[in-house]
Image (tube, rainbow, N blue to C red):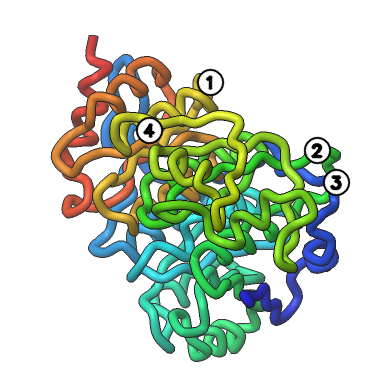
Amino acid sequence: MGKIVRRGSLAAAAALAATISLAPSALADDDSGPIDIDGSPEVVAPNGPNVWRFADRDRIGTALEAAERTNGVWGGEDGNIVILATDADYPDALAAAPLADQLNAPVLLTKPGEVLDSRVADYLQDNDVDDVILASGEGVLKSGIVNEIEAMGIATERVSGVNRYETAYLLAQEAISYNIADDEYPNIFLASGTNFPDALAAGAAAAQHSGVVLLTQANGLELYTFAALQPGGYAGNDAINHREVIAIGGPAANAAPKGYLGNPVDVDFNIVGKNRYETAAMTADAYFEDPENVVVASGEGFADAIVGGAYAANVDGPLLLTNNGGLPRATINYLTGNVDRGENVFVFGGPGAVSPAVSTQIAELFRY
């Protein structure tokens, strides 16, 4: 079985709530996320948005760049919290965006192993971080990293399942536990766990629409996702009492009717585009009306998109996807139809992930 292991002094209310996963609760629709951006935009479109780029020499640095240039407005009533994931793979952090939104927490990256990246260590100390949530198993972000963090006087918590599907299930429960005062159930967004784009677009939408993200397999549902959707749970695993079930992307829409061991699950509606770019744009169109902030990240590489997806959740904006060399048509259409002068578009990643031409192209869309 997976586990949520708390070490140190994470919020007592959350610790209690984690034991009552069937209690009615929903995630907040609004927050005071990191929207006070430090520095100057990369490009200013005369009749369009400010275009910012968060980039560094590697994916770890890019995540830190986003966190450090946000004027220290991360955190909330539970203190300054960071979600830490590996830079080497995407599965464990696929469903982290709603939790990041609840906690106003950035997602930072470090290499797998026993040693915390020194730049991340400096960030934790310089920003008076109280708690670090490790969205990864002990075989990836190992005990040496935990010991290093705790030696700084920072509490740690590990949210880890036996696989990516249980990890998503536990992250969903954790997100719900931080908002136990509301009287409505959350929505559940289903997205593929075998690739990253749909789940990251779903995470931003879920955070905006009082939801959490659960993952599907290629040809059906895994045990933990299925159990979460069943009244009363299944095979000793708790249900997540919920309102709507929304499948984001063709793989999730195809997996739900196949269900688990031949038992299908009902979906309220599907959002399926011709490709990942159109699916992300359609999701944005469905859940974000005139957003003040929009995030654009690579649809070809996961690392910057993982961080960008959580950032989008925190700034109450959608996650759109792009090719390295230029914007796909679906992304262009969403930007021109929904972004206005003075709003913000945040581009995540260095030139190896998203070329500088993309930022310029975004600005050029609004030169009229």
Q: Quadrant of residue 156?
A: bottom right
What residue is at 59 percent from the left and 56 percent from the top? 225
Number of on-image labels: 4
Alpha carbon of mark 2 to alpha carbon of mark 4: how far?
27 Å
Question: Disc 2 or 4, which lies upstream in sequence?
Answer: 2
Mark 2 near mark 4, Cβ–Cβ under 8 Å?
no
Alpha carbon of mark 4 to alpha carbon of mark 3: how far?
33 Å
Amino acid type at circle 1 is: Glu
Vertical placement of residue 275 versus 227, above or below: above
Observer able to see residue 96:
no
**Mark closer to the observer (2, 1):** 2
Q: Residue furthest top?
A: 368
Question: Disc 3 or 1, which lies upstream in sequence?
Answer: 3
Secondary structure under badge 3?
loop
What residue is at 55 percent from the left and 52 percent from the top? 262
What is the number of the mark on residue 289?
1
Secondary structure under badge 4?
helix
Residue carrying label 3: 181
**Mark closer to the observer (2, 3):** 2
Secondary structure under badge 1?
loop
Mark 2 near mark 1, Cβ–Cβ under 8 Å?
no
Amino acid type at circle 2 is: Glu
Q: Residue furthest front?
A: 262
Alpha carbon of mark 4 to alpha carbon of mark 1: how far?
16 Å
